[in-house]
Amino acid sequence: MRAVDLIQKKRDGLELTTDEIQWLIESYASGKVPDYQMAAWAMAVYFQGMSTRETKDLTMAMVATGDQIDLSAIQGIKTDKHSTGGVGDKVTLILAPLVASFGVPVAKMSGRGLGHTGGTLDKLEAIKGYQIEQAQDAFIKQVQAIGLSVIGQSNQLVPADKLLYALRDVTATVDIIPLIASSVMSKKIAAGADAILLDVTVGQGAFMKTIEEAEELAQTMVDLGKAVGRQTVAVITDMSQPVGQAIGNRLEVLEAIAIMKGQAREDVTQFICELAQIMLGLAGKEEDLKTIHEHLIKGKALAKFEAMVEAQGGDLSDLHRPSSAEFVTEITAEEAGFIEELPALAFGLFAMKFGAGRSVKTDSLDYESGIVFVKKVGDRVNKGEIIAKIYSNQKLNDNLLTNFKKNVKIGTTKNQPKDIIKIIS
């Protein structure tokens, strides 16, 4: 086979065979197909798309290029969760220990964030001593012992996806559903869990900007999971405003702890409980929301989280300390009314400017910086009342603060945002 023939075939809108896709991915992973040809193929896919069968073949071809983790030594139905990303998304920090507190094992490999704010691993690394790297045997033993582990993805897990994603990132071919779906599901399948909850975010702070796009991506990923024997459910969730109140790594850890102590807003607490109910259902454990809520606010989830932190080298005394950011700047309302909009992307990019996220992979993070919103969409605010607090290790100039305030929309409408928009199974 020749790569140029497969590029031409896809360019002309024809389907590649299973053997052709396997050859292309194996050859690219081994260095036989160069970046410039793979970039041309990705662009052909961008414009011509892929059939359901092609997407499945691509997913499994990428899985085959690396290790596949065997979790059979862990008793019970092993669960995993993935989010397509967003601003202030600390859901895994709460959801994973909450599910584990019911005796359902959660064996999760996570990635880092690029843009907006940090990923799950970045948030965990805001805890002094927390080790995100673990050998596979240690990972399995920890899940056997405490029912929970969240670690970084091994370099040997789906190496073809790592190569292809880096290429797509610099060739404007990221946002095409077959390539997004195969990228996500190849990693989830290789990670070995029996049941997978997919959180597909939608809105101006997410990859998917419309409900229709989010539904298509969610259904594609659910179908891929089911096709290889994994219990898979997707939820489409709102990303028009930040998740919860905090943006920024240390601040999001602190909010997660507050949620697990029953000290947070009821809306985000309810959202987490609803996700937990779905994830527990995937493992064959039916629980009512009241019982799940009690596990969350009465310390059972927090106990699991602390056990994981300690097992992975984290300092529990550091876990609970407040942000050490040098400056805390209060943003107050310039008029009375209701918060109508808090655009997630705008505030994610704002927080990134002073270290809460990365614009390129080599950027270092300021784990202490970020934003805490005292008010969220739908809340009433009086003139002069605090809307948000900005934590930073640099003094913010007037232009930055003016731009921040411009993105806070106050009006007369009391909007009622809905966190879970749709469930796809």
Image (tube, helix red, strand yellow):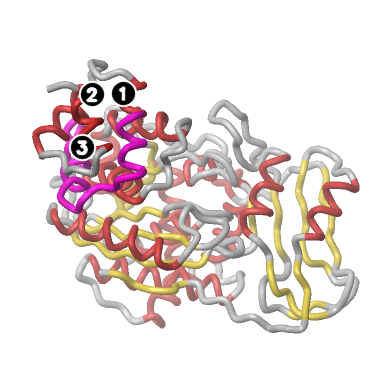
Residue at the front extreme, as displayed: 12
CA gap between label 2 and label 1 equals 7 Å
Residue lying at 52% horizontally and 34% vertically, measured from the top left? 129
| Disc ID at residue 21 | none
Closer to the camera, 220 or 67? Answer: 220
Q: Position of residue 48 (x, y in %)?
A: 30, 45
Q: Is residue 89 visible?
A: no
Q: Are marks 2 and 3 in contact (CB under 8 Å)?
A: no
- Comparing labels 1 and 3, the label whose residue is closer to the camera: 1
Which label belongs to residue 37?
A: 1
Q: Amino acid at mark 3?
A: Val
Q: CA distance from mark 1 to mark 3?
A: 21 Å
Magenta range is 40-68
Q: Quadrant of residue 423?
A: bottom left
- The correct choice, above or below, for 171 with respect to 264 in the image is above
Residue 53 magenta = yes
Q: In the image, is 322 to the left or to the right of 142?
A: right
Q: Residues within 10 Å of mark 1 (few under 14, many from 20)?
A: some
**Residue ID for mark 2:** 4
Q: Could you tell me residue 349's position as x and y percent?
A: 66, 47
Secondary structure of the residue carrying numbered label 3: helix
| Residue that badge 3 annotates | 63
Which numbered disc, 2 or 3, marks the residue that appears first in the sequence?
A: 2
Q: Which element carries disc 1, helix, strand or loop?
A: helix
Amino acid type, mark 2? Val
